[in-house]
Image: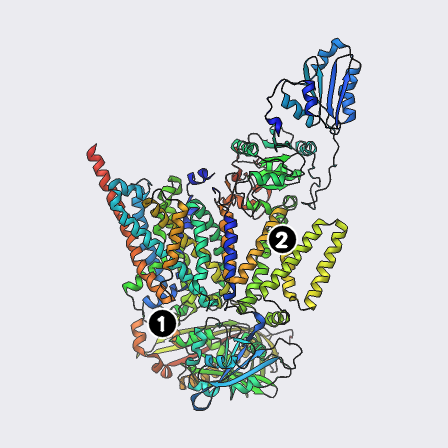
Amino acid sequence: MSTLQSSEKLSPYHIVILVYMTQFGVIIFSLPQLLSKAFGTNGWVMNLIFAIIVIVNMLLIGAAYWMGKGKSIFVILERAMPRIMLYPLYLFLMFVWSVLGCLVAKEYVLIFQMIAFPTTHPMFFKIALDLLVFWLMIQGIYNISKSITMLFYLTIWMLPVVCFFYADFSWSRLTPFFFREGQPSPVEFVNIFASYLGYELILMVFPYTDKKSKLIKSSIIGSLLLAFIYTYLCIITFGFFSLRQLQRMAFPLLDLMAYIKFPFIERVENLFFGAFLFTTVATVVMYLWSAQETALQVFKRANVKLVAGVLVIFAYVIAFIPDTLSDVQHWLGLFAQLEIGIAFILPLLLVVVLAFTKNKKEAAS
Amino acid sequence: MKNAPIRLRRALICMLLLLFMPGCGDQRILEKLGFVQASSYDLGENGQLEVTITMPKADQNAGQRRDVLSLMARTGKEARVKLTRESNLQLVSGQLRNSLFGMSLARKGLLKHLDTFQRDPSISPRVKLSVVRGNAKSMLERNYPNQPIISRYIEGLLQKESMGQNIPVSTLYTFIRDYYDDGIDPVMPVLRNKSDNIIIDGIALFRGDKYIAEIPADDGMVFSFLRGSFKLGELSIHLSEGEPGGDTVMITSIVSKRKVRVSRSAEGAPEITIQVRLKGTVIEYTGGLSLDRPAEKHTLEKQIDKELVKEANEMIAFMQKHKTDAIGIGIAVRNHMSYGAWKQMKWPEMYPTVKVKCNFHFEIMNAGKVVE
Amino acid sequence: MSNSQTESSLPTLAHTLDQFEDCMDLSHREFPNLGVHAVYLNTLISGAKLQNEVFKPLHDLEPDQLTTLFQQSQFEKQTDDKALILGILSGKAAVFAEEQVYLIDVRGAEGRAITNSEIETTITGPHDALTEQVSLSLMLIRARIRSTHLKIVKLSVGEITKNDVYILYIKDIANMDNVQELKQRISDIEIDAVHDTNMLIQLIDDRPYALFPQILTTERPDAVVSKLVAGRVVGIMDGSPSAFSVPSTFYEFFSSSDDYYQRWMLGTATRMLRFFALIVTVSLTALYVSVTTFHYEMIPENLLMTLVESRSRVPFPPLYEALLMEMTIELLREAGARLPTKIGQTIGIVGGIVIGQAAVQAGFTSNILIIAVALSTIASFVIPNYTMSASIRLMRFGFILLAGLWGNLGIAIGITATTIHLCSLISMKASYVTPIAPNQPYEWRDVFIRAPFNLLKKRPTQSRPMNMTRVKPKR
């Protein structure tokens, strides 16, 4: 039964949503604050810069994709060098991806704990979240993308609610100054860029696409969609709160949502934050699925479910270590640095390897 | 085992999770909670804080529809912890609607006390803040025969008045926002007891987080004209005597548009022009002008303009005297210049000396059903 | 059964009679002057038919005319023993003459008459429903599709019962892969007996452990026709008044024939109402539990005291309160379904009004909860397909439990789990959530809304029809 499923390739539309949902995560809750802290006035403009970086990176990945004619990155690498040499790289990727996945999940859970469940142990929630992730990741990328598309529709309806803030939004609060009163630093830059991460995982979807998927183009559209939504939300936040107020808020978006009031329901952040579970699951599942794909390269004969189970349990155990929200955010920053490295170096490595093997082939012929 | 019974397994897991249920210390079941709906803060003896809270009672048979608890503590949250001992219910602040601050406390600065409001995720940013003339505790403790639930009473009062633009909206969100903005100072309504009722007595002006001065409630409309654009307002103007047509005009359905223009004088000091365009309907006029003649209508408009300009100038001078920029002139000035110049200018020092000119342009949309 | 082991051989009268030993309804009639024997089951045949088709011709016959008689088309010659027995079992008469055996169809057409559709009623449109007698059902469908392209294939299921299953499809529209797949799956079934189409579909669906029905069943011939012309493959079983169509999508279960018989705006509004009903039925009670247990902040001030007052006398936590009420409603529903209609109504009144009123007055539940439970139950009945509606009602209990456990997070977990589950389902190898994933924006107009007919030019992709375009309306 599953043969038909796995032979199907991802369609451009699903790639757009897959990339968008993988990138969109809980960091959006603190993103305006991070931007205002690091870049000060009109920090939302930086979203555009980040979007450009993402696109450049995506084109680099695209180069690897086109040169390798859509072959899996493992095939490309293993053609160039012996597998034993690649094991450390695989294990490293596996480690970084599964830890990133678990940190994102943990951050979500901790924020929810802060809102509504101050004394319940957060790892209880994480069990449920990890079970969902496990259940989804063993179904393969095609079903993952299907589910993520459905989840996308379950979250996107929240966007029009932002109109609610137009009454209290004021352009004059944005100030005419650009990037004043911030303290930009490379660390902050990385922390903020972490909210854009996730797009690099399309490296793993290479073999599940064909010409019709328009992988790179669709991914770029997905990232642009994300950049647009991030920018929109950030503009609203910057015009809704005053700058120094914003700099002091841990989760401006949460306060923003708390401001919404309907005749029949108030304080909708309680409800909306629940809906962010959908995007969180999407992000986590993509990271862990990528880790799983890598693990399957190391343990070729292993059962998919077993590998997935081990990875999820590993991620669960790791999530015990950072205990507080600030710990998690600190770790997230560290691993984001590693991930940015991977996002640039891995495709670069692929391009080099491809160029090298091509030359060799030409020399041989 | 090929097609593993996922649902069965899931059901099993759900059962397992249910076993953890007794550990839910975070349940906040409705009837076991005491909803703090209004709280008040007064300056007590030796720097202590006198905290009073009211919460509604569910029991319809009880004579009182609400509980009022009060005690001295160092901070608001400490008070809540202590107050919980006095109640059979668990006190929660997620339903807080109103917070009242005694005048003496407001003079000493409110930011310290607002910290918990910002920090506690259960408190809504929509909590309405007001200053009470005299003691805030006594306002909460008092029984209002017609209004069994005081928080709803105050909330309704403030809501209605701010809808009509007689007072500015003052919530936790606006206060903190304006406090941290460098071109505007926050404001709050001032409440006072009057026999068995509560009335709005004026608009408290803050410098930073400290109460400085007050604008009488009658001038609230003019204050609103200066503070921003809005729709829907009502204004009664007593025109200066001695001029032809004198007497009172009542205007409703006012649509007001404010623009602040900033120019530089020869010495480089900013000069501000506040331009207010108003449109409205006359529903009462006791003077002698015939409002269906364009020329005379125009005369009345001019008279109104003049009166408003006079009041506005007085108000701005008053605010400049007290060094509080409650109408956000600073924002306009800031947005007019470069960042360096703005920082160099030291706006708070500059503000009292800056020249502000007001322009009002009133347009009578219609004069009601009467033709003279 | 033992006869599966017997070698199939040339049928003889003795052997046939032997097979039917102790079957009191077997009749054996002999025409000594002709040397002809007729064997049939008198419970299955129609006496008049037998008289006209067999006895009368034989009665007036000279022995030498026998061959010419049997050359007529209603007599089919049988050489296989098993087929012969099966023929007799399905209501045919076996005629043994001159070492030959012939079968002639004399099936009695007795059974329930065509009645109104009871489960899927519509306001406008045809009211007739399929019946247990498959020939009647097929007649209803055949009469609606006057085309030679409507093909009907016969299969049988059940090792003992040998029920007939007919597969219907329209040549050149339906994808033959689907037809093949369906045939394959039906013939692969190994089971003693199949009693109903709804049982049959559980034996051939892709995910037997799933919560949701993956194959749509209907008892409306007009719905069957619409599925056929959309390129789907339809199955009908003898003895069951419902037909099924494959492949099906989740959203199909939310559309009713009425949507197409109303003006398109009305149809659209009704369809949206059903999806709204889905949300209400799944989340309303759960939200009540979640809000009263964890998220008291969300209650608006005006509602707060009403809620607290109605909750204040209730002795249980909201979770148990809600489960209790939901159980009561389910009991009422089940009792109403099992009892004769007239008593069922009484149950509705006693249960709905008396228990509800008394429970609130006794301080057993809060009246707000009664409203929530009643609303979500009513909403569940808005879903046209009974199986789907029942699945969703069951799912609701999961949501209530999760809400009682973890509040809104629990509800979000429930929604995510449901979504993952839905997306993992497939129906006849095609995605169950089709117009959303895989994304087919064109089809949204016939799923979430009901666009005017001149905009519905394409057939649904899920059934992978051979011809995508419906006939284009001239407008």
Please determine whether, in this image, residue B68 is positioned above or below residue C339: below
Q: Residue furthest top?
A: C64
Q: Residue at x 77, y 51 (%)?
A: C342
The tally of labels here is 2
Q: Quadrant of residue C152?
A: top right
Name the image colouring. rainbow
Amino acid on which disc 2 is placed: Ser
Tell me if residue A340 can be seen.
yes
Whole-percent x, y for residue C228 in the image? 60, 35
Crowdedness near tag 2: few (<14), some (14–19) or many (≥20) residues, C-alpha within 10 Å = many
Whole-percent x, y for residue C335 in the image? 70, 52
Helix, strand or loop under label 1: loop
Q: Are marks 2 and 1 on the same chain?
A: no
The reply, left or right, for residue B345 in relation to residue B45 is left
Mark on residue A248? none
- Disc 2 chain ID: C
Pair 2/1: label in front: 2
The reply, left or right, for residue C297 in relation to residue A8 is right
Residue carrying label 1: B336
Q: Residue furthest left?
A: A363
Mark on residue C380? 2
C80 or B226, which is in the foreground? C80
B92 or A269, which is in the foreground? B92
Amino acid on which disc 1 is placed: His
Crowdedness near tag 1: few (<14), some (14–19) or many (≥20) residues, C-alpha within 10 Å = some
- Marks 2 and 1 sit apart, C-alpha to C-alpha, by 60 Å
Whole-percent x, y for residue A137 in the image? 42, 49
Q: Residue at x 69, y 55 (%)?
A: C332
Please determine whether, in this image, residue C417 is positioned above or below residue A63: below
